[in-house]
Image: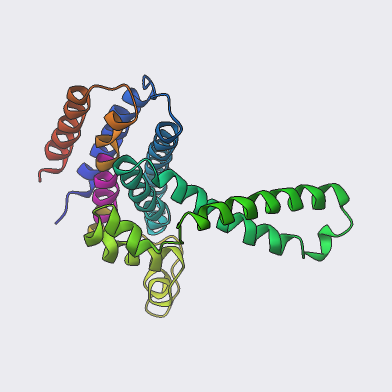
Amino acid sequence: MPNLEGAIQASHEIKDAVEAVLLVTEVQDSGEARVGQCLCLTICEQYVAMLQLVDAGSATQAPILIRPMLESLADLLNLVANADYLNQLHFKAARENRETFRRYLLVPDMQDDAAALADMHRIKDEADQKYQELRALGFEQENMETTLLNAGLEHDYVAYRVLCAHTHNQFVSLLARHAGVGELRYRDQPARAVTFGFLKMATAILGRTIQTLPAYTLHAQADIDALIDRINAIWDERVGE
């Protein structure tokens, strides 16, 4: 039987240890370093939010936050390995913005707001320009399987698909969450092993994220190694694995 209570306690202690380091972090002076730290901070915030869901008795919704943690970790690892990956992120954003605002401009309720239309045309035109510039340089849209592969996370693709099934309310996941015998369940807790698995997966992602800090901050490698050792020790002590 997994030690769920120990995992919850460990996760909170690990959160506190990580946040103590984040609060004194200085970032290297480059665009890619600042984006790297933004990805790190987002992953850490999502870890905190995931814990709050578990504490609130809504662990069935935890994958909604663990999935973007994994996506952001893949982006972060790719960025650390190659600073030019920042342009891939720009390409992705430009591609999404040009399509979003193209469709937004067609919304009937927007047609009488001249100022809003002007702003949206400007944003769309800027996104179009950026998209065309980067596409001319050879950048293309990546699917998540490729992004994970390039980040060295190819073995996490199956876990990613499972997280997607929960996030998008895939039919089987929907039934598993709510369908009971002669009743439909609301805020019913998943099996202890499932919640334990969510916490373990999220904590592993958090640990991989923290390991990247020396690549884009002024933290010494030895200090981050010590933090990783502390994270592992907390988990081992509280969970007993």
Give the magenta part as a residue range.
197-207
Identify the residue at image location x=26%, y=44%: 203
Q: Is residue 191 visible?
A: no
Q: Quadrant of residue 81?
A: top left
Q: Position of residue 40 (x, y in %)?
A: 38, 37
Q: Is residue 132 left or right of residue 50?
A: right
Q: Nearer the viewer, residue 54 or 146?
A: 146
Q: Position of residue 185 (x, y in %)?
A: 43, 68
Which one is in front, 7 or 180? Answer: 7
State the predominant SS element of the stretch in magenta.
helix
Report whether 14 appears left or right of 234. right
Q: Residue furthest bottom?
A: 182
Query: For residue 139, which quarter of the picture?
Result: bottom left
Q: Is residue 62 left or right of residue 197?
A: right
The residue closer to the viewer here, 183 or 107, is 107
Q: Is residue 207 visible?
A: yes
Above/below status of 37 relative to 220: below
Is residue 206 a member of the stretch shown in magenta? yes
Residue 42 in magenta stretch: no
- Answer left or right for 142 relative to 12: right
What x and y, as percent, mark residue 91? 51, 53
Q: Position of residue 175 (x, y in %)?
A: 40, 75
What residue is shown at x 46% (from left), y 67% (from top)?
168
Task: Count every numbered label the image shows and give the total.
Answer: 0
Q: What's the residue at 24%, 36% (across, down)?
A: 211
